[in-house]
Amino acid sequence: MGPLSRLALILVALGLLAAARSLADPQGLWLLVDTGDLTLSVMRGDVALKTYDNIAIGSNGPTRNKRVADEKTPLGDFRIIEVRVNTRFHRFLAIDYPTMDDAQRALGDGRVNQSEYDALRRAWNRGGPPPQDTRLGGHIGIHGIGKGDPEIHAAFNWTNGCIALTNEQIEDLLQWVGRGTRVSIR
């Protein structure tokens, strides 16, 4: 097989991977997180089917250029990659942060080195979860407050970068979403 044939095969494989990652929820549902209004909406197309008010985000607000331990919520488009129950935060919907868009921006502005970028790229090409231990941070998701104080949740953005709902809200949200659901944080 010549170099052009190998390149074509690689491009086709990457295209199939991208297509698989972008498959829409069979019901057409996705989540819109509005970091300005502090709402999370279950969407079908452009229609909000359910909106949860008074969510909390990272204590230092949202960002396009997240770094580990900056307590900022990453902006962008993600997918739910895992649903965890019985966690410190009641329920945890892990998202696929950092994405390749995040990695490419971070390589360009020096927030990650080539080795970290390559590890992220390998994980994405395999279709696995991205490494959570790069300088971009990780362990980002949507969760409840667990045994936390509902009054603090109602008054402050308190997370390390995640999106938090009340325990009742996250329980309700679970009926709408699952692995693969798209999450747009704006």
Image: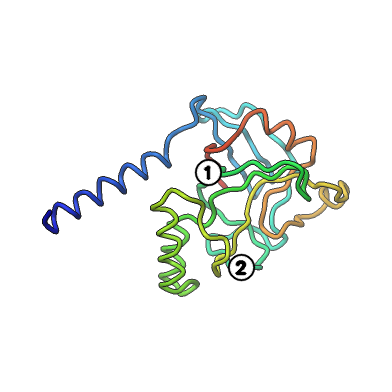
Q: Is residue 120 left or right of residue 41?
A: left
Q: Earlier in the sequence, mark 1 or mark 2?
A: 2
Crowding at dot 1, Cα within 10 Å, few <14 / some 14-19 / many 20+, comes out as: many
The structure residue drawn at horizontal position 77% and vertical position 48%, both measured from the top left corner, is 89
Along the viewing direction, whichever of 180 and 111 lies nearer the viewer:
180
Q: Residue at x 88, y 50 (%)?
A: 149
Residue found farthest to the front: 1
Task: Give me the disc on residue 129.
Answer: none
* Circle 2 Cα neighbour tier, 10 Å, few/some/many (<14 / 14–19 / ≥20): some
Q: Amino acid at mark 1?
A: Arg
Per the image, label 1 sits on a secondary structure element best described as strand
Residue 3, position in %: x, y?
Answer: 14, 59
- Residue 157 % position (x, y): 75, 55
Position of 12 with respect to 163 (left or right) is left
Amino acid at the residue labelled 2: Val
Query: For the residues marked 1 and 2, what is the alpha-carbon distance in whole angstroms?
Result: 20 Å
Residue identifier under label 2:
68
Q: Is residue 39 above or below residue 99?
A: above
The image shows residue 8, relative to residue 135, as above or below, that is above
Measured along the vertical axis of the image, is residue 56 above or below residue 25?
Answer: below
Query: Which colour assignment does the render follow?
Result: rainbow
* Residue occupying the point 46% across, 67% down: 106
Write down the quadrant of residue 40 in the picture: top right
Q: Which mark is residue 79?
A: 1
| Residue 112 image point, x, y percent | 48, 71
